[in-house]
Image (cartoon, rainbow, N blue to C red):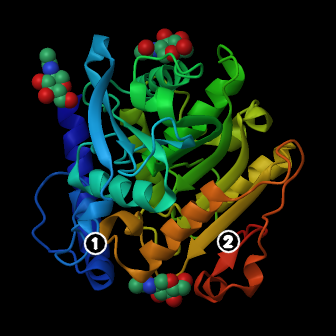
Amino acid sequence: MHHILSSFILYCFLTFSVNIRPAISAVNSINSAYDSSPFKHMYEFDGSGGSSLMGSETVPESKDIVYLPEFNLSARLYRPIDAAANQKLPLLFYIHGGAFITGSPFDETYHNFLNILVSEANVVAVSIQYRLIDVCPLPCAYNDSWAALKWVASHLNADGPEDWLNQHADFQRVFVSGDSAGANIAHQMAIKLATEEILEGFSVAGMILCHPFFWGSELLHGETQDWSDNMVELWEQMSPTSSGIDDPWLNPAKDPNLARVGFLRLQVFVSENDLFQLRERGWYYAQKLRESGWSGYQEVIDFQGENHVFHLNNLNSRNSTILRNRIVTYINQEWIDASVRMKPSRDWSNSPLYDMISMIGRRVLRAD
Ligand SMILES: *[C@@H]1O[C@H](CO)[C@@H](O)[C@H](O)[C@H]1NC(C)=O
Ligand SMILES: *[C@@H]1O[C@H](CO)[C@@H](O)[C@H](O)[C@H]1NC(C)=O
Ligand SMILES: *[C@@H]1O[C@H](CO)[C@@H](O)[C@H](O)[C@H]1NC(C)=O
């Protein structure tokens, strides 16, 4: 199984490197020393952008803790360096991407991203590890992440095992976020919050999905049959026990519990030139959520000319900075009333940022 998987991924990888190499290198000047590890090119920093924070005095404190000893799984915790004792801060629960195949909270890529985001957003963060599919296919990543979320929730009464969370986590302001496969997992956390055991007193204020990894048998605008065939095969390797390409794990539109997702607000980022053709899936997710009857506030932010997880590849680019600013604003926004359909407290249409972001808000999906 491992061999088949590696060959397939290598095949995808080679196909991609040919097709998307010019785009990627033009955008991010990623050094072209590809090795055989899948997806590595997406996560490699260029020389100029990857050096994490400017002004090292704001680099947050971080430390690793084991949250699931059974599988030796850890999370990396972050808090702002200047957090006062017992100062309550929003809590960011972060789930890394990497197609369920690769990635870790301990990678330089994620560590640098979390450092800068924690510093800018002034949050306490938990960036989790989960088992990748070479160790255990889906739903293991979901179950592990759920265990991590429950571990976080065990700090609700400020008497959990981890002092940083006891002191700083504001459970009225919990945000769950992930990129790519991590965003797929984030959605599953929202489903589990609605359908599995109730975590008394625990709720998610907002969901932040970057380039979420979803798919389905029905092709959307910009999705090709060739790539969809790859996705079918890839998904079989990721999730041999699922019901296929329209399994709710991959296609939330097919989930009868969609309207019950356990969060109040949604923020989705997509990119026009997403090499996995995931742009439309982010829009589709938001649309299907609205159609399901879920009535929270949502925004979709679509970056022209950008690629999959561009914001991780070059932290200092203009668009990466804009993306983080949107997250920071979203997390720290004063929301008028969490129980009704919410409006942003600020009208973005007058913002200079507005012109630089191609589309914000709602649109009807186009059929090919
Ligand atoms: C547990 O995982 C850590 C990395 O997260 C590793 O350094 C350590 O060797 C592992 N321990 C065991 C017993 O496998
Ligand atoms: C994952 O969690 C589900 C629901 O709690 C459970 O039924 C299933 O057995 C778990 N799977 C694994 C592989 O742990
Ligand atoms: C950044 O975003 C703007 C507006 O969406 C776009 O025109 C531009 O091409 C993007 N930058 C890059 C480097 O792709």
Q: Is residue 254 above or below residue 351?
A: above
Question: What is the quadrant of the N terminus in the image?
Answer: top left
Residue 70 placement, left or right of 205: left
Location of residue 46 by image quarter: bottom left
x, y percent for residue 181: 44, 45
Residue 348 placement, left or right of 183: right
Label 2 to label 1: alpha-carbon separation: 44 Å
Identity, as a three-letter code, of the amino acid under mark 1: Met
Crowding at dot 2, Cα within 10 Å, few <14 / some 14-19 / many 20+, comes out as few
SS at mark 2? loop
Residue for point 86% across, 48% down: 337
In front: mark 2 or mark 1?
1
- What residue would you read off at disc 1? 54
In the picture, the disc for residue 119 is none
Residue for point 54% across, 21% down: 158
Crowding at dot 1, Cα within 10 Å, few <14 / some 14-19 / many 20+, comes out as few
SS at mark 1? loop
Question: What is the quadrant of the C terminus in the image?
Answer: bottom right
Residue 65 visible in the snapshot: yes
Q: Is residue 150 above or below residue 83?
A: above
- What residue would you read off at disc 2? 368
| Precedes in sequence: disc 2 or disc 1 | 1
Which one is in front, 261 or 34?
A: 261
Q: Is residue 73 above or below residue 313?
A: above
Identity, as a three-letter code, of the amino acid under mark 2: Asp
Cβ of mark 1 under 8 A from ligand 3: no
x, y percent for residue 37: 16, 51
x, y percent for residue 188: 58, 33
Residue 40 placement, left or right of 264: left
